[in-house]
Every structure is written in C-alpha cells, then in structure tokens.
Image (tube, helix red, strand yellow):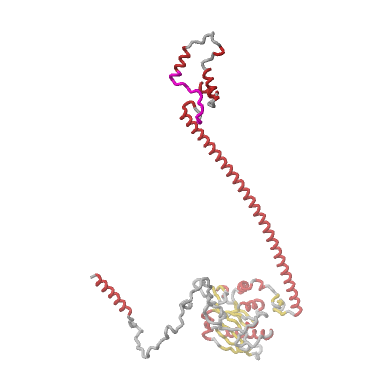
C-alpha cells in the first residue's frame, strides 16, 4: 500500500511540472497572437559554430596560473576628430582640410579672421561662449592672441553644446572681413557625435566641437562644461580633460573685447589662470622667442641677435644648472657617506653598550646563582649534620659513639653496678699508710687508665672520655 501511495505522489508531481512547463500565449492589453506565415528557417547547428565560453576563453584550454590578463580597452566611440600629426604643429590641423604647415604670417592671419568669425557667429545667434586656456591668457596680457600659441580654445555650457548639435551641426558660415572686404572665408561648425558622453571615457573624444577653416584645416577647439555630478558635487563644472571650475569662478560672465570683437571671459579669470598656469604666467615678460614691450603692450618677436644672445644665455644657464646639479649630487654623496660613517659609529657604540650591559647582567646573574648554590650547600650540610646526629643518638644512646663501629671507650656501668660501686667507695675505708704510695691510686685513676687504653685503640680519646665521665 505504501509503495502504491508513493508512486501516485511521484506521478502527481511529475504531471504538475509538465503542465507548468507548457508555454501559454501572452494576454492582456497590447498583446495578441500572430500566426507565423512563413516557415521557420533552419538555424545553424551548434557543431558548425565556434564554441566560446562566456569569459571569452576557448573550450578545452585551462587558464594558466600566474598568467597576466590583458587590460581591456575602455569601450566607447572611435576618435571623431583626426589630425595628420607627424610633428607638434601637425597636430593643430584637421586632416580633412590640411594642405601643409603654414608660415608665421599666414597662421596669424588665419587665426585672426577665424576667431573673429567664430565670436561673430555666436553673438549673432545669441549663443554663449567664452575664452579659455591659452586664449584667455593672451586676453589677460593685451586682449589679443599669444603669437606663439597655435591653439585657440573656447568653452560653452553643456546646454549650449547640445543646442549646437541639434541646430547648427555641419553648418557652413560665410565670413567677410569688415576691415578688408577682399577677405572672404568659409568655416565649418562640426559637432562631435559623442557630446552625449560627458565623461572622459577612452579619451578619444575630449573635444566636443570644432570651428574649422576649410581653406587649410586650422581650427578652434570648443569644449563643453557640465555638472556631471549635481547631486554629490553641485556647482562643479568639468570637461572631458579633467578641468574643473566652480560656478562662482565662471558666472557672471564678463563682457570684453578680444581681437577687435565682443567676447566673454569667466568672472574669476585671474584665479583660473593662476590655478592652470601658476602666477609666473602673469608676470614673465620673456617667453618662446618673444618679449613683452610695455610701451606698445604687445609681445614682439626677438631679432636674430637677440635670439642668439638668448641661446648663449640659455646654454650658460644650462651649464650652470648642470654644475649645480653635479655639486648637489656630490654634496649629497658626501653627506650620504658621512651619514653612513656616523651610522656605523653609532651602531658600534650601541653594540659596545649592549655588550657591556650583557656582561653586567651575566655577572649579576652568576653572583646570584653562586649565592643560591652556597645557600643550598649550607642547607644540605645542616641537613646532613642533623641526620648524622639523629642517627648517632638512635644507635648508641647518650654516648654518641662513632658510626664506623670502632671502640666506644669506657661504657657507663649499669644502674645497679654503679650504685654498688658508689656505695663501696663510700664505705670502703681509706688505704692503709703501710702500702706503697707509688701503687696507690684514686678512685678515678682506674677509669683514666681505661680511657687511655681505649684511645690507643682508636676510640673517643682522652678529652671526650673526661667529658663522658664528668
């Protein structure tokens, strides 16, 4: 009966599992069953596929212990803006429009009109942008571009960047100079598709947009600032190249003039420049082959003679620097040797002091041990003496005889005999005078003779015999 009941329960459970495993059509709002009109195409068999594990390893190959894993490259969009490279100057051209490196005069002319066209475009369309980095530093000195700077850098807010991408991406701007109508240029506003990524990511797209001169490929970098963590870090604006600003450093913007057109600069421009370039950038008047002329308020290129003199001075300073470094190195080496010698002396002194302390400690321990041994020895001698005295009393009674069983000397007479001897001595009359006095003896003379004879046999001796007799 139990077997039948158990079988019935097992079958019931299996039936329940089978019913639960049958797929049911989806029901509810927005769902309906659709009949497949076309036959199901056969799929590629698992044997013909290349088997791969989830971790990317091939089946049958075990991971070798101690084998370093290759660092995975950060995923993200590929680099959008590309430069021809090949040199430092080559990195300042867009590869799509580059036709070689321009000379100093052509570059200055290109940058001047390109910047004026950029600021005019933003002003006409009521879009906010401001000067940044080296371009802002050039404004600080004289409201113009630094002559040695190949970069023109501007910044916009994240909202303005998104607006540019939605309404002005890939737009061409036709420019005509107000000073010289013969100067006509075409500029491309190109917005990076990766503007939605406000973190650095793999670093391929830290530039969000560019204003490009289609004649030669020179460009203006446009970088967006966003509050990437408004909950944890409110009021902190960052770009993809790790530049960080506070809201109070940026706003309210200051309106000014730059290269003859209206421009904007951050509110705390001095604090921003000092943080990025240090305070020296605001006071040095000799840099990159140019010197600052306070009269005309311009950075003027140096003459060939001045450049040669600067070169000689630079070489002399370099030699002096190397000499100072060599002296410093020698001084450090000497100090290191002196330090090592002093350290060796100190260690030796510490070792001698430690040995002296150990010797004193060992001597004190030795004296203590000797004292304890002496106390122990005296105690053992006392114990042996007590044991010896107790053994003599037990073996010989009050005579204190020797342990070696030698002659015990005259033994004390028994009580009855002693009494008889004493009585006889008392009653016995004195010796008659007729006897020979040389043969006469006192009552104790006989006992003394016995003691003498006993001493000759190696017993107690005369002194102890007298003590025992008395």
Name which residue lies at 66% across and 91% down: 182
Tell me: residue 225, above or below residue 397: below
The quadrant holding residue 330 is bottom right
Answer left or right for 296 relative to 19: right
In the rendered image, residue 393, in percent from the top left (x then y), is placed at 47, 29
How many badges with numbers are in the image?
0
Tell me residue 89's x, y (percent). 65, 82
> Residue 123 at what x, y percent from top left?
58, 84
- Identify the residue at image location x=58%, y=88%: 173
Which is more toward the observer, 311 or 227? Answer: 311
Rendered residue at 50%/32% (across/down): 388
Q: Which residues are magenta?
A: 403-418
In reply to whether residue 407 is colored magenta, the answer given is yes
Residue 449 located within the stretch drawn in magenta:
no
Q: Residue drawn 46% across and 82% down?
A: 50
Query: Magenta: predominant secondary structure element?
Result: loop
Q: Can residue 115 be spotted in the picture?
A: no
Task: State the image coordinates of residue 10 (x, y, percent, origin top left).
Answer: 28, 73
Q: Judge from the rendering whether residue 124 lies leftward or rightward of residue 109; answer left or right.
A: left
**Res. 212 image quadrant:** bottom right
- Please tell me which residue lies in front, 117 or 27: 27
Q: Quadrant of the N terminus?
A: bottom left
Q: Which is more toward the observer, 298 or 405? A: 405
**Residue 401 seen:** yes
Please tell me whether residue 300 is drawn above or below residue 351 in the rendered image: below
Q: Nearer the viewer, residue 455 or 242?
A: 455
The single residue placed furthest to the top in the displayed view is 434
């Amino acid at each position: 009966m139990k077997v039948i009941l158990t079988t019935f329960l097992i079958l019931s459970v299996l039936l329940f599992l089978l019913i639960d495993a049958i797929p049911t059509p989806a029901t509810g709002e927005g769902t309906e069953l659709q009949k497949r009109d076309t036959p199901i195409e056969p799929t590629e068999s698992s044997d013909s596929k290349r088997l791969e594990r989830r971790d990317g390893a091939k089946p049958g190959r075990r991971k070798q212990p101690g084998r370093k894993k290759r660092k995975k490259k950060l995923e993200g969009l590929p680099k959008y803006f590309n430069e021809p490279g090949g040199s430092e100057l080559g990195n300042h051209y867009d590869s799509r429009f580059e036709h070689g490196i321009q000379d100093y005069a052509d570059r200055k002319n290109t940058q001047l009109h390109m910047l004026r066209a950029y600021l005019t475009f933003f002003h006409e369309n009521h879009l906010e942008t401001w000067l940044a980095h080296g371009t802002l530093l050039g404004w600080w000195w004289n409201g113009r571009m630094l002559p040695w700077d190949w970069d023109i850098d501007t910044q916009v807010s994240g909202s303005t960047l998104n607006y540019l991408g939605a309404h002005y991406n890939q737009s061409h701007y036709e420019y005509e100079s107000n000073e010289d109508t013969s100067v006509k240029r075409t500029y491309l506003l190109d917005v990076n598709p990766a503007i939605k990524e406000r973190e650095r990511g793999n670093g391929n797209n830290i530039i969000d947009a560019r204003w490009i001169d289609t004649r030669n490929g020179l460009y203006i970098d446009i970088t967006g600032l966003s509050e990437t963590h408004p909950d944890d870090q409110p009021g902190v604006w960052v770009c993809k190249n790790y530049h960080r600003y506070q809201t109070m450093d940026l706003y309210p913007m200051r309106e000014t003039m730059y290269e003859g057109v209206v421009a904007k600069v951050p509110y705390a421009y001095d604090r921003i420049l000092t943080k990025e370039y240090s305070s020296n950038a605001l006071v040095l008047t000799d840099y990159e082959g140019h010197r600052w002329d306070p009269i005309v308020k311009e950075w003027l290129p140096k003459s060939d003679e001045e450049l040669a003199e600067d070169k000689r001075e630079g070489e002399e300073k370099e030699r002096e620097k190397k000499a100072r470094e060599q002296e410093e190195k020698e001084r450090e080496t000497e100090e290191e040797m002196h330090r090592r010698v002093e350290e060796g002396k100190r260690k030796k002194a510490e070792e001698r002091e430690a040995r002296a302390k150990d010797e004193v400690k060992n001597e004190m321990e030795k004296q203590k041990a000797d004292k304890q041994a002496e106390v122990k020895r005296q105690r053992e001698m006392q114990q042996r003496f007590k044991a010896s005295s107790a053994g003599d009393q037990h073996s010989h009674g009050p005579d204190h005889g020797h342990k070696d069983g030698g002659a015990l000397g005259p033994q004390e007479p028994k009580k009855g005999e002693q009494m008889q001897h004493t009585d006889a001595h008392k009653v016995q009359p004195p010796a008659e005078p007729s006897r020979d006095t040389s043969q006469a003896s006192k009552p104790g003379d006989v006992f003394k003779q016995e003691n003498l004879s006993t001493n000759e046999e190696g017993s107690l001796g005369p002194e102890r015999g007298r003590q025992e007799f008395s």
